[in-house]
Amino acid sequence: MAENKQLPESQKEKIAARGAEPLLRMVGIGKTFGAVRALSGVDFEVYSGEVVALVGDNGAGKSTLVKTISGVGPADEGECFFDGHPVVINSPQAATRLGIETVYQDLALCDNLDVTSNLFLGHEIRTPYRTLNSTEMEKRALAVLKTLDVKIPSARALVAALSGGQRQSIAVAKTILRQAKLVMLDEPTAALGVAQTRQVLNLIKRLKDQGLAVVVISHNMVDVFEVADRVVVMRLGKRVATFDAKNATSGQVVAAMTGADYSTIGGEKASAIGGNE
């Protein structure tokens, strides 16, 4: 697999200036479950080399939006563009073909298998004789783990023996092996200790440095402000605000989540980019 390179500074500046085309752009997304309007007219975008935190109270529509992007729950209405082209994401397979990968809270790892087997589960490499090419899979596994600076005892260590942070890292490494362009992480630091949380946050930063687009669902404002470039706030199925993480405060974001006036919290004007722009 080709190694992901660091983005040149010129491209990072372009992304910072928002002059580049978003990797993913969704316009007017709507989703209904019976009589419940889960998403209503949601616009969403994320750029390559950017981390977007998706926040909101329970039931705000965060998970529904992620499932729409990942093809698990296709949108009922709206348009989707990927790499500048109109696309239809109506299944997880369609999302994977585009380069969209999602890591859910349960991680979808098999505790009884080793690291290498988990990384290639369902995508095993075989020899010309159709037997498993264990040597090549282990070689590629070690290469991608090194790229992400993931430290584990061995590529043949059982996943059941790994820490929470290491398990999260293995789940993310699977997306890189599948040539992901956009990685979505659902509560990646939930139930992790301090050291394991630090490991996962560093991993998110490395994904960004390698030019991937990253979407993180999180309720932890400390984690959000450490890794995010922008914070998108969902409330009652709508995108109600977007903040530049460098110029906003957690108080302003929480206020937007609850429907309060966030414009003067913290003693200065909030740096809100807006809701559905």
Image (tube, rainbow, N blue to C red):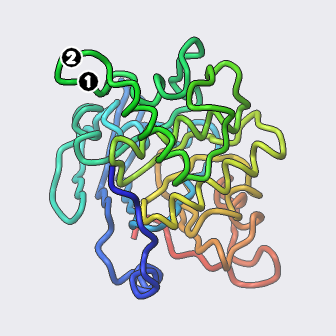
Q: Secondary structure at mark 2?
A: loop
The structure residue drawn at horizontal position 44% and vertical position 49%, both measured from the top left corner, is: 183
Image quarter of the C terminus: bottom left
Quarter-of-image position of residue 94: top left
Give the residue displayed 73% in from the left and 31% down from the top.
Answer: 163
Quarter of the view holding residue 65: top left
Above or below, 160 against 72 in this view is above
Q: Amino acid at mark 2?
A: Arg
- Do the residues bearing badges 1 and 2 touch, measured as CB atoms within 8 Å? yes
Report the residue marked by disc 2: 130
Query: Residue at horizontal 35%, vertical 33%?
Result: 32
- Res. 97 image quadrant: top left
Closer to us: 254 or 222:
222
Q: Which mark is residue 126?
A: 1
Q: Is residue 61 left or right of residue 200?
A: left
Whole-percent x, y for residue 130 in the image: 21, 16
User: Horizontal and vertical percent for residue 195?
Assistant: 82, 46
